[in-house]
Amino acid sequence: MKTRTAALPIATFLIGCLLGGFIIAADFLENVIPDLSKSLTADVWSIKFSEGAKPYDYADVLGEYNLAQAYLWQPMYFYKRKVGYEMLESLATEGYTPAVHDLYGYHVNRMHYYSAKENADAFNKHYELAAHWAKVAADQGDERLLMMFITVDGFGLQEDVSEELKILDKWVEKSSLNTAPKIMATYYEKVGNKEKSIMLWEEYEKRSKTPRTPPACTTITPWRGF
């Protein structure tokens, strides 16, 4: 009887600690982290997702983007994955290409998770969505995802990629990404187009010796006021 009486306060204390820990963790996930995303600052004052579009406060965009990433990718936010996806989808649709990269990566990961033989429906669903976001990125002026989809992630899964290759061929000619010719040369080698492969290997060797200069927007100076 005395043992039971002594154990009761201990059990009550442990339960109280567990509940307290749960409340603190919940507050951290639901309030602290979202509030941190609102306190981000950016050296660039505003951002336009496309020519002629209205500018957005860049700090606000970064805050929303980082929170959406946490919701989609972090295991502790398993219950907010759909919310994170929808936040990224909204940003991507508006024209914020980094969000498109997250959505593409999410569906490619799902493609790898599901086997085309064991769960063809789920695999095909994520395949189609990965293809969709790769094309959205290309439409927004970033052809890198389309290149990765055609040459690696979706290689051999689409019978006719002639239109996609036309887009990529034009892009490789003007792109400052010095590894682009190498990736496409390897692809054409795999599919048996030796002439195109040789031409692109030569272009890659040329860029290896004289790399192209990245766009000016890849580097900014700190914000110092007007």
Image (spheres, rainbow, N blue to C red):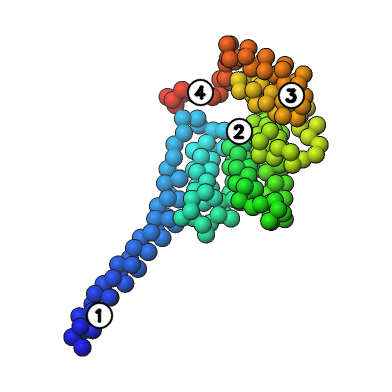
Which mark, by number, is residue 48? 2
Gap in Å between the C-alphas at discs 3 and 1?
Answer: 74 Å
- Res 164 quadrant in image: top right
Measured Cα–Cα span from mark 2 to mark 1: 62 Å
Tell which circle, 4 or 1, labels the residue nearer the N-terminal end. 1
Side (left or right) of 98 relative to 28: right
Amino acid found under the numbered disc labelled 4 = Thr
Residue 135 is marked as none
Q: Amino acid at mark 2?
A: Lys
- Foreground pick, 194 / 185: 194
Secondary structure under badge 1? Answer: helix
Badge 3 amino acid = Asp
**Res 189 → quadrant:** top right
Spatial CA distance of label 3 from label 4 is 27 Å
Q: Residues within 10 Å of mark 4 (few under 14, many from 20)?
A: few
Give the crowd class for mark 2: few <14, some 14-19, many >=20 residues within 10 Å.
some
Q: Whole-Å distance between the Cαs marked 4 and 1?
A: 63 Å
Of labels 3 and 1, earlier in sequence is: 1
Q: Which residue is mark 4?
A: 219
Circle 1 is placed at which residue position? 8
**Towards the viewer: 16 or 52:** 16
* Neighbour tally class for label 3: few under 14, some 14-19, many 20 plus, Cα within 10 Å: some
Q: Residue furthest left?
A: 2
Q: Earlier in the sequence, mark 2 or mark 1?
A: 1
- Residue 51: give x, y in percent of width and height: 67, 30
Q: Secondary structure at mark 2?
A: loop
Q: Nearer the viewer, residue 40 or 154?
A: 154
